[in-house]
Image: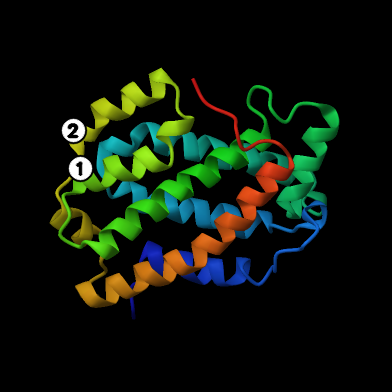
Amino acid sequence: METKSEIRSAIEELSVLTKAQPDVNLDLAHIPTKPFLHVCTLVLQVLDKIGPTMAVLRQDIHQNIQRLEILCESDPTKYSNLIEMLKKEESEGNARKGSSCSKAFLWLTRSMDFTVALLQRLVKEPGQNMEQAVQESYNVTLKPRHGWISSAAFKVALKLVPDNKTFISLLMTKDQNHDSLKEDMQTLISLLVPLLEQIHSILRFYRLDRLKSS
């Protein structure tokens, strides 16, 4: 039986997600909550392959997934669409405060931006130095939104990044070779990019896009 990698599982889940076509009216947009959170969990498993370096980011992603899951479970029918969570907190005036679900959604999206940037670099330059690839991906996605504390923590953790060959071998299943992994990575990127573009439009609509961490 074929062993399914995290990347292939994410591709399958994204194929379901992308069927929810973007609505021109962002107020009527629909992002299915459970498939989105499942993709985030699979992305988390990909980041796990980088090792201790991603510990801080991993913890954030896990907590943000849990936050959205708890609200979803409180009213599964209503919150089957993530946008309903944004509307609720926007109407209550809590969207940009503390540990809101809106902020959890924002940071999950940014974590996936980082993952896409990293995969794009590894597809374009398979032999690229892993530490450099992680650093450059961080610089263009998370760093502009991170404060001093988060940036300092990441800088320390960067020294623990595995080499490129180790990371790639961890991503591959037993039945895969480098070419099929590259193909899977390209497919994942092609599905994630338009979804993330749609989500960023929604985040701008709800004025969440400029929030930063400490």
The residue singled out by tag 2 in the image is 159
Q: Image quadrant of residue 147?
A: top left
Q: Residue at x 15, y 59 (%)?
A: 127
Q: Residue at x 77, y 54 (%)?
A: 26
- Neighbor class of circle 2 (other Cα within 10 Å; few <14, some 14-19, many 20+) is few
Please identify the residue farthest to the right as the structure is shown: 91
Q: CA distance from mark 2 to mark 1?
A: 8 Å
Q: Residue at x 82, y 56 (%)?
A: 28
x%, y% of residue 44?
A: 42, 48
Q: Image quadrant of residue 185?
A: bottom left
Q: Is residue 175 visible?
A: no
Q: Is residue 163 left or right of residue 19?
A: left
Quadrant for the N terminus, please. bottom left
Q: Image quadrant of residue 56?
A: top left
- What's the coloring here? rainbow
x%, y% of residue 196?
A: 56, 55
Helix, strand or loop status at disc 2:
helix
Q: Nearer the viewer, residue 210 or 108?
A: 210
Please, what is the three-letter code of the amino acid marked with disc 2? Lys
Q: Is residue 96 left or right of residue 117?
A: right
x%, y% of residue 43?
A: 43, 53
Please, what is the three-letter code of the amino acid marked with disc 1? Glu
Please identify the residue farthest to the bottom as the structure is shown: 1
**Depicted 93 relative to depicted 141: above or below:** above
Helix, strand or loop status at disc 1:
helix
Q: Are marks 2 and 1 in contact (CB under 8 Å)?
A: yes
Q: Is residue 135 visible?
A: yes
**Depicted 186 relative to depicted 47: above or below:** below
The residue singled out by tag 1 in the image is 131
Q: Nearer the viewer, residue 122 or 71?
A: 122
Dot 2 or dot 1, earlier in sequence? 1
**Depicted 156 relative to depicted 169: above or below:** above
